[in-house]
Amino acid sequence: MGQYDARVDAYIEKSAAFAKPILNHIREVVHAASPLITETVKWGMPFFDYKGPVCQMAAFKEHCAFGFWKASLLHDPHGLLKIGDGAAGSFGRINTIADLPTPDAIKHFVLQAIENNDREVKIPTVKKNPAEKKELVTPDYFEAVLNDHPKAKEVFDKFSYSHKKEYMEWIIDAKTEATREKRMLQAMEMMEEGKSRHWKYAAQPPKGKV
């Protein structure tokens, strides 16, 4: 992992024509925010890191996405972040550079994210009444991975509340970033096969019966 990664160059180069200026713009602004930022590629997407993920970008067939790994921790006085939104990333679907926040706003978020990673600030776990069943909100980082695995996302969206919750708790409860990344990749593989988190323990028919 270095300040610039040739794999990110290759990713941008193979992206659709409309996406290239958007991705290059994001890359330029993020690096301009701090010389501490480095690049890598995870789950097929360019990531910008400093002691862990800071933000990531992706290009799809008709739009781009740009999101912050721990968006819920960022101070957002102007309401630019779409935390928990179904769209990819933290700013919804991006079709042109004009759909992005200003460079100054992006830099402000990048610097906050760097500080949070430096201080090892974690997203707080909110304990809920087990009797309450509210809408399940997926973390922005998991939403980004789902959007890069459309087959898994389709399965996840059709899951029952309990099956979604099983995956969310497994991923959120990871003690380290490496463990969380590993679990998310495993989750994508299982969901692409239509499997729930605990599919191995699902009721099986008695032997000799179908």
Image: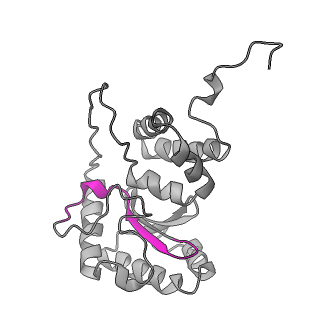
Chain part drawn in magenta: 59-76
Vertical placement of 182 versus 36: above or below? above
Which residue is at 39% across, 65% downward? 67
Q: Quadrant of residue 35?
A: bottom left
User: Is residue 6 in view?
Assistant: yes
Q: Position of residue 7 (x, y in %)?
A: 59, 72
Residue at image point 47% right, 58% down: 144
Count the numbered circles shown: 0
**Percent x, y of residue 124:** 26, 42
Across and down, in percent, residue 132 comes to 30, 30
In this picture, residue 114 sits left or right of residue 37: left
Question: Foreground residue, 138 or 119?
Answer: 138
Query: Residue 53 placed where, x, y %?
Result: 41, 58
Please say whether residue 60 is one of the residues in the magenta stretch: yes
Residue 1 visible, this angle: no
Vertical position of residue 166 compared to residue 41: above or below: above
